[in-house]
Image (cartoon, helix red, strand yellow):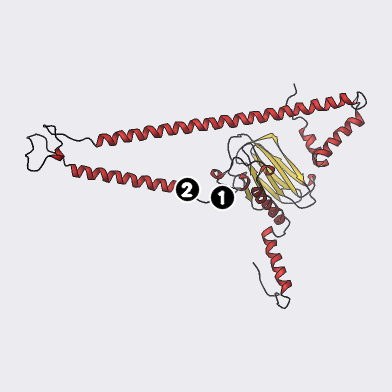
Amino acid sequence: MANPNDDRFDGMFMNLAQQVRGIDPLLDTFFGFLRRKTDFFTGADDQQAMKKVMEALMKQKKFVDDDKKKAEEKKAKKAKEAAALKAKKEKKEKERLAKEAAKDKDDGVVELGSDGFDLDTVPAAVPAPASTQSPPNPPKTETKEKGDGGEGEGEGEGEGGKDEGEESDGEPPPPGNGGTVEGKYVWTQTLQELSLAVAVPPGTKGRDVNVVIGKSKLKIALKNGPTIVDAPLHKPIIIDDSFWTLEDGCQLQFSLSKSNQMEWWPCVCEGDPKINTQKVQPENSKLADLDGETRQTVEKMMFDQRQKAMGKPTADEQKKIDIMDKFKSQHPEMDFSKAKFT
């Protein structure tokens, strides 16, 4: 059986994919090679050729299905473990409450005199029976118990209010579970991988870019140009499963596979701004899988990054410029030559 992780020719195919730009051209190129250089089409009838193609296709599809099944099993296992942990915490909490209730019950025991009557209920006119023990002071004890209970309730409410305030601080989740590193890149992430979009000058070719993807370091630079990124990664990655492509001659796309695929990264490189991983939404995935609003936000961040790299206004800045141009056209009698706009 073929090895699903046989990546010996990934570099060659990646270079080919970058040159032809697209799945359809890549398939055309491959079958064109079979037509020109092999007897794939002439050595057998059409049915046999189609059968061979379908066998290869279904073999790879089975690998994909197996990976999906493993991912679902891992997700179900994690959910089961989380449920078990939650049940364990709830059990401990119930035991704690039961102990506190038992303790409160012990604190409320009524002391009886030698005649079997509650000392608190003995009338003042009836002399108390002789005893070597001094009678307790119930009002004082009762007042103390109430005071203790009040303090406990006050502390509980204060702590509860604090936790609730921390959880509902109003901070929105990071778009795509990532963010923007000003002047460098826009990034998103899933539990398994990181995706980076790096704006480069229009017309950039693959040979104009110097990229080094290491296990714990990332370098992105333009030959005869600036170094965009040169820093240690936040955590190690799997080099063989990480790659980059150049899209439309103006943007580098990186896919970095995490070594530990069960944790969220607060940043891509050390020293970059960090996001709050407590706000991460696990259902978000790649850019194509994001919901419409989140995807629009991430795409706007990527657009602004490209505009800044080219020295052009961002989307918000362009909107202000358009509004001002419209206002100028509606009021030609006004002189804006000395006006300053921010």
Which residue is at 51% across, 32% downward?
A: 83
Q: Which residue is mark 2?
A: 166
Q: Nearer the viewer, residue 45 or 216?
A: 45
> Which labelled disc corresponds to residue 172?
1
Placement of 52 over or under 121, stated as above or below: above
Residue 306 appears in view: yes
Where's residue 101, x and y in %?
Answer: 32, 35
Placement of 319 over or under 28, stated as above or below: below
Instruction: Give the residue at the far bottom of this rendering.
Output: 333
Q: Is residue 323 left or right of residue 167?
A: right
**Crowd band around label 1 with a 10 angstrom C-alpha radius: few (<14), some (14–19), many (20+):** few
Which residue is at 48% across, 32% downward?
A: 85
Q: Is residue 40 left or right of residue 284?
A: right
Report the quarter where the C terminus lies. Answer: bottom right
Which residue is at 14% across, 34% downward?
A: 117
Residue 184 appears in view: no
Q: Nearer the viewer, residue 340 or 89?
A: 89
Q: Amino acid at mark 1?
A: Pro
Which comes before the other along the chain, label 1 or label 2? 2
Q: Amino acid at mark 2?
A: Glu
Where's residue 268, x and y in %?
Answer: 62, 43
Where's residue 257, x and y in %?
Answer: 66, 36
